[in-house]
Image (cartoon, rainbow, N blue to C red):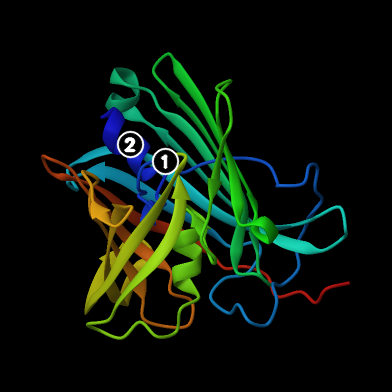
Amino acid sequence: MKIGTSGFLRMSVVCCILVPGLLLAASASGAAEQTIVPPPAGIQAFHPGETLTYNVSWSSMISAGTVTMTVETEKLPDAREVLRFTVRGRTQGLVDKVFSVNNAVQSVFDPLLMQSLSYRLRESYGQKKRLRVTEFDHANRSAVCRLNEDPPVTLTIPDPVQDGLSLLYFLRTKEDLTIGRRMDIDVVDSGKNWTIEVSILARERIATAAGEFDTIKIKTYPKHTGESVKRREVFLWLTDDDRKIPVLMKSTLKVGSFVFKLIDMKPGTHRLMQ
C-alpha cells in the first residue's frame, strides 16, 4: 500500500505518478501572497480557483482515500504573479486503519517560462515522515534538491524542465495531442533528471461521478538517463476540449492498479487582474 499511494501522490500524478510522490507548500522565493486572478492569456486549460477531487481505489474495488488538486496564484518578491499547484491526499476507511497516509505536494510554476520554480513534497505514512524540496535556477540551468536534513544535491538541468506535479498541468496546456503522437518531457524528481515518455493513445468516453466525458487517453513512462527503469506506467484520460481535465488516472502495480477517478470539480475564476 505504501508504494502505490506514495506513487500517486507524487505523480505527478504523473504524470506523475501520481507517480511517485505528489504534495507540498512553498514558493521558490519565500513568503508569498495568494490572489485570485487569471493566468496569462497563453494558458486556457485552467485558472486560479480550480479544484479537482478524486476518489482513490485499488483496481476500482477497494476505496483507499481521496485526493484534491487546486490551482492558486501567488506573488514573488518582485510582485510578479505565478501559479501554485497543490495536491493533498489522505487514506480513509479500512486502508487508513491499516496504513495511514497523509501527503501534500506543491509546485510553483512560472506561466511565462512555462517551467517549475520549486517543488515540495511532504509525506507522512505510518510513523514515517519525509520532506523533499527542489528549487530551480533556470538562468544557471541548475536545481538544488534536498531530502530531509541530508546534504543538498545540485543537478545540471535541461531547458525546459518540469517537476513531477507541474508536468501534469503542463500537459494540459498542450494543444497538439494527436492520436499516435509521442513526445518526451524532461522532469526533475527524487533528486534526479528524468525523461517522461508521453504517448497519445486513443479517444475514449469515460463515465465518473462527476459526469460523462469525451477524453484523450495518454500513457506516461519515466526513463532515467535515456534508459527504462522499474517505475510504473501511468495512464491519464484528459477531457477532449480546451481544459483537458484529468478525469481518470491509473498507476499500474505488480498486482492491479491504483485508480484516481474524478468525483467533483470546481472551475477556476476569470477575474481581471487589479
Residue ID at (48%, 34%): 103
Residue ID at (57%, 54%): 70
Q: Amino acid at mark 1?
A: Gly
* The image quarter in which residue 150 lies: top right
How packed is label 1: few (under 14 Cα within 10 Å), some, or many (20 or more)? Answer: many
Q: Position of residue 48 (x, y in %)?
A: 66, 64
| Front residue (pair 92, 231) | 231
Q: Is residue 204 visible?
A: yes
* The image quarter in which residue 97 lies: top left
Q: Vertically, is 114 above or below 128?
A: below
How packed is label 2: few (under 14 Cα within 10 Å), some, or many (20 or more)? Answer: many
Q: Vertically, is 124 above or below 204?
A: above
Q: Amino acid at mark 2?
A: Thr
Residue at numbered disc 1: 21
| Front residue (pair 120, 52) | 120
Q: Could you say which disc has been placed on residue 5 in the image?
A: 2
Q: Vertically, is 92 above or below 224?
A: above
Q: Secondary structure at mark 1?
A: loop
* The image quarter in which residue 120 lies: top right
Q: Position of residue 159 (x, y in %)?
A: 54, 65
Tally the marks: 2
In the picture provided, is 198 more to the left or to the right than 111? Answer: left
Q: Secondary structure at mark 2?
A: helix
Q: Is residue 164 visible?
A: no
Q: Position of residue 157 (x, y in %)?
A: 53, 55
